[in-house]
């Protein structure tokens, strides 16, 4: 099947003199996002040749710890949702969501 369209997502990382991220912004023009600021990125890419996940985790030095906890919790919940859509495995997705609830409770980030 030939590629008919392409879409581009760009990340711009501003680094300090020690190459520590100070600013993160991203653009996805097709999605209507232009130079949106962020404080953290977690990106996973599947390498089909080596059957391994390549990862990039970045966060700015001013990312508060409480927001980092929320970011991880929300990312885990999103992974459970994506896992269910990708595999149709409702049982394991529910197990993942149970862990997410436990994670939020232990970090005391449970929303009322």
Image: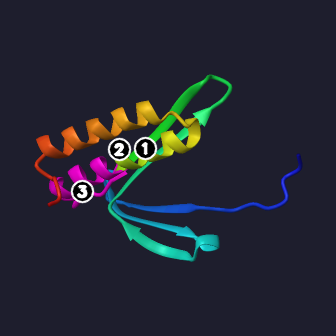
* Residue 18 vertical position relative to residue 45 in the rendered view, above or below: below
Task: Choose between 59 and 21: the one closer to the eye.
Answer: 59
Q: According to the image, label 2 marks what residue?
A: 76
* Residue 95 vertical position relative to residue 38 in the rendered view, above or below: above
Q: Position of residue 14 (x, y in %)?
A: 40, 63
How dense is the environment of label 2, judged by Cα within 10 Å: few (below 14), some, or many (20 and up)?
some
Q: According to the image, label 1 marks what residue?
A: 79
Q: Secondary structure at mark 2?
A: helix
Residue at figure coordinates x 28%, y 48% from the top left? 73
Q: Earlier in the sequence, mark 2 or mark 3?
A: 3
Q: Position of residue 88 (x, y in %)?
A: 55, 37
Residue at figure coordinates x 62%, y 22% from the top left? 50
CA distance separating discs 2 and 3: 22 Å
Residue at figure coordinates x 56%, y 35% from the top left? 87
Is 59 one of the magenta-colored residues? yes
**Most extreme residue toward the front, as rendered?**
91
Task: Choose between 46 and 80: the one closer to the eye.
Answer: 80
Can you tell which of label 3 and label 1 is closer to the viewer? 1
Q: Position of residue 34 (x, y in %)?
A: 53, 76
Is 49 one of the magenta-colored residues? no
Asked if one can make out residue 19 in the rendered structure from this viewpoint, the answer is no
Asked if one can make out residue 43 in the rendered structure from this viewpoint, the answer is yes
CA distance separating discs 2 and 1: 5 Å
Residue at figure coordinates x 24%, y 56% from the top left? 61
Q: Position of residue 97 (x, y in %)?
A: 33, 41
Q: Secondary structure at mark 3?
A: loop
Q: Secondary structure at mark 1?
A: helix
**Magenta stretch, residue numbers:** 58-74
CA distance separating discs 3 and 1: 25 Å
Task: Say whether residue 28 is left or right of residue 42.
Answer: right
Q: Earlier in the sequence, mark 3 or mark 1?
A: 3
Task: Say whether residue 3 is left or right of residue 64.
Answer: right
């Amino acid at each position: 099947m030939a590629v008919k369209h392409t879409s581009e997502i760009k990340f711009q990382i501003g680094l300090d003199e020690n190459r520590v991220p100070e600013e993160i912004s991203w653009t996805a023009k097709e999605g209507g996002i232009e130079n949106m600021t962020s404080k953290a990125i977690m990106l996973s890419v599947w390498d089909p040749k080596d059957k391994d996940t390549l990862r990039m985790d970045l966060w700015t030095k001013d990312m508060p710890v409480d927001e980092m906890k929320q970011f991880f919790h929300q990312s885990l919940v999103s992974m459970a949702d994506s896992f269910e859509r990708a595999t149709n495995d409702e049982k394991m997705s529910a197990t993942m969501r149970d862990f997410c609830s436990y994670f939020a409770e232990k970090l005391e980030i449970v929303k009322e």
